[in-house]
Image (cartoon, helix red, strand yellow):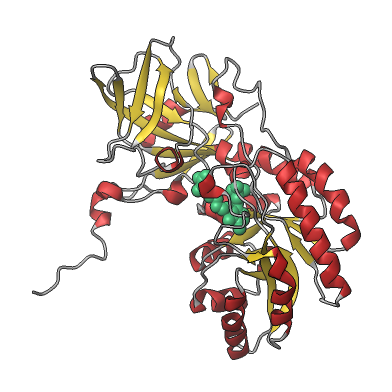
Amino acid sequence: MSAFAYRDGDLYCEGVPLAHLAMEVGEPLYVYSLDEVERRYRPYADAFPDALVCYAYKANSSLALCAWLHRLGAGADVVSGGELRVAQAAGVPGHRTVFNGNGKSDAEIALALEGDVLSINADAVEELERIAAIAERLGRRAPVSIRVNPGVDPHTHRHIATGVTSSQFGVAIAEAEDAYAQLASFPSLAAVGIHCHIGSQITQLGPFVETVDLLADLARRLLRQGYPLRLLDVGGGLGIDYGRWQGADPDASHSPLTPTALADALLPRVRDLGLRLLLEPGRSLVAPAGVLLGQVLHLKRGADTTRVVLDTGMNALIRPSLYEAYHAILPVRAAPTAMTVDVVGPNCESSDVVGRGRALPALASGDVIAIMDSGAYGYALASNYNSRPRPAEVVVRGERWWITREAETWDGLLHGQRLPSV
Ligand code: LLP
């Protein structure tokens, strides 16, 4: 089951027709299903009852979703002062928040320490000295984990593979013990855990198993040496099945890798360590819970290709342009397939193609389409390119819905700008 389904020819989000939302609020518009977020979160909570599931805010840091995930029991994985402020506004306590990132400013480190986060995950030994100095200045002991790069290939798009040796993230696992020795040399730092994240949109179990075996070995060595570790943070990365809308039955196929399968494979490998497991899922919690609604402006007939021109594109959802990512495109009112088209955005870039060679009904100016699975890395990566305002966001629960973020406006884009007095 998905929260998005056709009923009597109308595409619904839970109990609300998307066409109704488009009419009431206007497109472009992000729509999220709280039920779907819950349905995606529960399997993690059930499969990892003793773990802390820290939702990766970078996937979608909209306050309404973050607060909902907090209510469901999730902690927060944040990578910036801005994300930490959202977590705090959502009510997530510091002891359920981890602070990640490979470039933290002094102000962000101070904010994390003042917010009593569970762990600051250091990306490099060179970062330790700065964290230590700030902790000392604030009269605190900073809880620190080191992000370890295990050198494992997650078999995903090269832009989102982070655990390979050539990536810029983390400390190579061969150098990890030295890094912990350096950590221990700073009196204002406390080694609390090990962190790792090997990549995103991972659809196979193998890379996780390989990684966790390497981390467990490292943890055993460090524990034997007396480091008072408490946490083993294995990051996020579970992929979703973006292709599941292509068949006749959108619910016929499922996420290629489930939290249950992950738990079955990982938990026996780490049980003896006595460490608290942390997970940082982003995409798998929120991607399937969101759609981006766009309006057809017109059809443009070329020599070999007909193009459907939308009022939204890479400015609101950059994944297809950036990674050639596939997102299903569905009409909000069902009709028989009538044409094969390229669906393009309105921005002045030849990469602003939302989907190529898509079989769609005979669309006309004013029709509304839904770009599926846009809940993760959609709004979060939206920009004002071509000076387009970012869309509004709506959250649905049953038959009720709320505008949880207003659309930006043309005038709003001028806010804070000044002319120089030349
Ligand atoms: N933890 C860390 C340290 C991360 O860097 C990430 C994602 C996550 C957790 C969450 O990973 P997830 O469960 O969402 O796969 N913009 C790209 C994805 C970039 C992922 C960056 N790191 C996309 O749209 O596919």
Q: Is residue 83 above or below residue 66?
A: below
Residue 295 coordinates in the image, percent (x, y): 33, 29
Q: Examine the image and state in which quarter residue 165 appears.
A: bottom right
Q: Is residue 361 visible?
A: yes
Question: Relative to 247, is 296 on the left or the right?
Answer: left
Question: Relative to 228, is 373 on the left or the right?
Answer: left
Q: Total number of numbered labels?
A: 0
Q: Examine the image and state in which quarter residue 256 appears.
A: top right
Q: Is residue 32 above or below residue 217?
A: above
Quadrant that contains the N terminus: top right
Closer to us: 166 or 317: 166
Residue 378 coordinates in the image, percent (x, y): 46, 44
Q: Is residue 282 visible?
A: no
Question: Relative to 184, is 18 on the left or the right?
Answer: left
Q: What residue is rendered at 75% in x and 73% in y? A: 177
Q: Farthest residue toward the left?
A: 422
Q: What residue is rendered at 26% in x and 61% in y? A: 415
Quadrant that contains the C terminus: bottom left
Residue 21 coordinates in the image, percent (x, y): 42, 32
Q: Is residue 13 above or below residue 365?
A: below
Residue 28 coordinates in the image, percent (x, y): 36, 37
Closer to us: 131 or 90: 131
Q: Farthest residue toward the right?
A: 272
